[in-house]
Image (cartoon, rainbow, N blue to C red):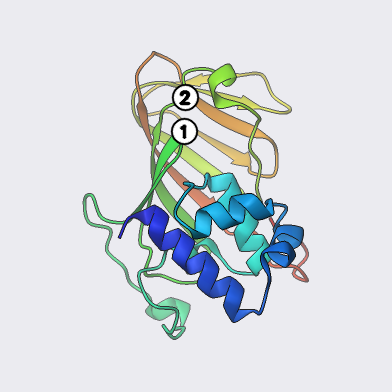
Amino acid sequence: MSTRQQIGKRVRRLRKGRDQTLAELARLSGVSVSTISKIENDALSPTLDVILKLCDGLNVEIGDLVSEDDGTQTDTAPNSRFSVARKDSGVLFDTPNYDYLYLCPDVKRKQMVPILARVKARSMTEFGTLFSHGGEEFLFVLKGEIEVHSAFYETVRLAQGDGVYLDSSMGHAYVSANGQDAEVLCICTEPKAQGEGESAI
């Protein structure tokens, strides 16, 4: 089963488990009914932006959509969790701007989200609208060069070995700066749930 099929299947299972209609999830997430239906029926590969909005609407973390388990995994104490990220392991999201390899998908309720990504967009024209979500993130360039575009700061160019830390709620985008795909490691924090001093994603 492809990642796209897995995501669609889990979105449907979580939605129905909450007795939500497509319209109700659309209202809560800000994702259109037609888009949700296409995702659930394996007719559309969602971007990370859409995935995060669906997580908000379903009141789940991203790990609940990408985890390999069937949703019955029990929680364990944070100090007893241990997960090895082997080369080429994880859950892959293939989107127009990035390929995201979501690492350690078996760990639920992470306080940080490790992602190995390939930056594919070559310009902001190709990328589109700046992307924002809850939490903070640190990005480190493993290979190639990227430009970091943001809502409040001048564009910054990063080469291999450079990094940037930013507030993820600020609109931002990473694009390749040398005409070739770049590889980056991104560590994101999970946004606080509503009622913990921060609004949801």
Q: Residues within 10 Å of mark 2 (few under 14, many from 20)?
A: many
Q: How many badges with numbers are in the image?
A: 2
Please name whichever residue, 54 or 84, is drawn nearer the observer in this view of the structure: 54
Eyeballing the image, is 198 above or below 181? below
Q: Tell me the quadrant of the picture where the N terminus can be found.
A: bottom left
Q: Which residue is the site of mark 1? A: 96
Answer with the quarter of the image where residue 85 lies.
bottom left
Please name whichever residue, 49 or 159, is drawn nearer the observer in this view of the structure: 49
SS for dot 1:
loop
The residue depicted at 36 percent of the width and 27 percent of the height is 182
The CA span between labels 2 and 1 is 7 Å
Viewer can see residue 189: no
Residue 166 placed where, x, y %?
61, 39
Q: Amino acid at mark 2?
A: Ala
In this rendering, the label closer to the viewer, 2 or 1: 1
Please name whichever residue, 59 or 147, is drawn nearer the observer in this view of the structure: 59
Residue at the top extreme, as displayed: 178
Q: Amino acid at mark 1?
A: Pro
Q: Which residue is the site of mark 2? A: 121
CB-based contact (under 8 Å), mark 2 and mark 1: yes
Residue 122 placed where, x, y %?
46, 18
Q: Tell me the quadrant of the picture where the C terminus can be found.
A: bottom right
